[in-house]
Amino acid sequence: MALQAEEAVRNGTAEGHGLVLAGVTKRFADFTAVDDLSLTVPAGSFFALLGPSGCGKTTTLRMVAGLEQPTSGTIGIGGRDVTALPPYRRQVNTVFQSYALFPHMSVLDNVAFGLKQRRVRDARAQAKAALAMVELEHLGARKPAQLSGGQQQRVALARALVNRPAVLLLDEPLGALDMKLRRQMQVELKAIQTEVGLTFIHVTHDQEEAMTMADTVAVMNQGRVEQMGPPRQLYELPRTAFVANFLGRSNLMRGRVAEDLGQGLGVDVAGTRVVLPKARATEHHGSVVVGVRPEKVRIQRMDAPFTATANQLAGTVVDASFTGVSTEYLVDIPGVGLMGTFSQNLGQDPASPGEKVRLLWEPDYSFGLAGGEDTGAGGVRP
Amino acid sequence: MTAAPGLRGRHDAGRGRAPEGGPNPEEAAADKKRGRIGQLLVLPGFTFLLLFFAAPVVVLLAMSLYTKAPGAEIGQFEPALQFSNYAVVLREYWDVLVRSFAFALAATLAALLIGYPMAYLVAVRLRAHRLLQGILLVLLIAPFFSSFILRTQAWKQILADEGPVVGVLRALAVLPEDGRLTATAFAVVCGLTYNFLPFMTLPIYASLERLDTRLLEASGDLYASPMRTFRQVTLPLSMPGVFAGTLLTFIPASGDYVNAALLGNNRDTTMIGQVIDSRFFRVVDYPGAAALSFILMVAILVLVMAYIRRFGARNLF
């Protein structure tokens, strides 16, 4: 997906310019919000900054917008250093979480605001076109307070987009919307981004939102980027426990490398041998954490036949909850703890709590993290 | 509790949503009850205004048409419909009336120029510093704790010929060697400005206090420089405060007589309040004083109405 963006730049189809943060640090009186952050966002891409609240993602966004000054480091937009420029001199526009629409102006005047500041000739016509793009052209004369939340959100989007900024910043723009509207807006936002080809930086704490919309996701934690890459890569091969737990869910098991198998590692997990591909492990020696995504794990009764090549752990079902499409299980593995899995509803008889079961997964699905990782980091959110 | 459904119904209607179903009898009864309570609550204020505003105005109006009884002593008048009273005082005091409004206008503008930045500093700039904000607000209101007369008297000292202000201005040759500030129009406007400054500052503070600073960030983000942000976002959103402040300053300043009496002279700084005062208590010309009072009231009313029509309600609230 990043390739697509680069291609767009080469072909001149991308209107946006890339964003480069180099060693950006922001310290407030008593804590460091952003810690030596460096990242490059290719022009024309949809980039998501994902993290829990307080991870520094919004501060990062505000520094790009110029609303906050970095303590150190530089910010470049389209190859130009903008670190010292005030917000009104930056080719950047923001869709604020609170929308921040001017209550004393009509919707159309709100959208035309940025164009008027730069004395663009046909500001009103362009503003009308932008309103048409978000399908609100009929509400231009209204005041923002007369619109619904979803409509206000779209006005805020049009107000930012109409300026064709080098980088469009979105600060949890869908946070205030209900689930249904949120899904709809996700699709619309993505479609608009594809259509206009601008660089979008989307800040969110919703991992599903980040994964469905972005070409590249950077997972932030405590002011640093934990891992960055296309959503699928992040999901399939997390490099830290925080990413493994924050982006989706993971079963993490502590173990010790017992044997080098050439392509893989034999890891001793609570007395059972588990195989982990070397290419998917950050450490090849000593203590490691072996992880596997719940949906990659199959659950079987002890008497069912199984392939010996699969990793397997035996345990007791603690909880089974039927959700219709699938049944979600919590299985207690002696010496490891609780592991989660679910099985698609194919009409089989679900295992019930108390039953002894075998959990199996293909070795290729395992990923290995450093042994020092806190397996609870980025933990299960309510 | 019985009022709750009715309240919700009204709320919905206000939002432009059609209430579900027709008006139900329970709701109508609640509405009626609330209506009665409302009337009851308005009663004390209404009575007060009737006794101490409406009645005196009627008395004033009647008195402004009295005439001097033939051969009567000073201060003795008899009821009549002597409309020429108005023409007489208007002819005699037209200049004073115009001057009063000019002084009040000057003081209002000066108070706006001083009060707005003060209110902005306290309400917006110091928003994060609650303690400092509180201290400055108290300082803003502190003058109210001492007597109006005393404060005005103090200005006499400040602007006195031997005082520091005159000294400095003379040294800088802004004032000629024998120039003075006391007993000038400048001193009167200074006194008016000072005394009514809180009435200007507090309403502006109140509206700036509610200003969402995220809007200022949005404006900056949309290419507006700080100056343009002020003109296009901050100022329009604080206009209700400016509007209230200018009215609260202009109206009492037009009728003020203390500042002109203490800080002015008897020739070219006389304000209409002084004239009414001396007509009533020194010359004992009740009809003339009453006519002037009435003229002042109507003139203020006309000016304020024109102001409201031009800048008021429609755009601001």
Image: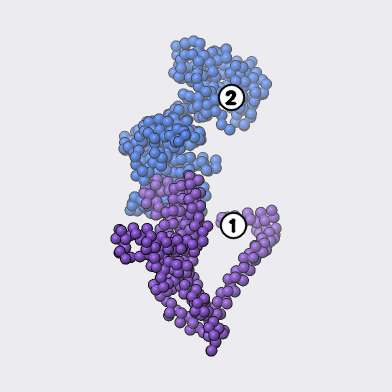
Chain colours: A blue, B purple
Residue B8 image offset from top left, x and y in percent:
63, 54
Q: Which mark is residue B13?
A: 1
On screen, residue A158 above or below B66: above
Q: Residue at x 34, y 58 (%)?
A: B168
Q: Residue at x 56, y 31 (%)?
A: A381
Q: Is residue B256 left or right of residue B174?
A: right
Q: Residue furthest bottom?
A: B70
Residue at the spot of label 2: A340
Q: Are marks 1 and 2 on the same chain?
A: no
How busy is the neighbourhood of tag 2: few (under 14 within 10 Å), some, or many (20 plus)?
A: many
For badge 1, the amino acid type reads Ala
Q: Which mark is residue A160?
A: none
For badge 2, the amino acid type reads Gly
Q: Is residue B8 visible?
A: yes
Q: Is residue A313 left or right of residue B210?
A: right
Pointer 1 chain: B
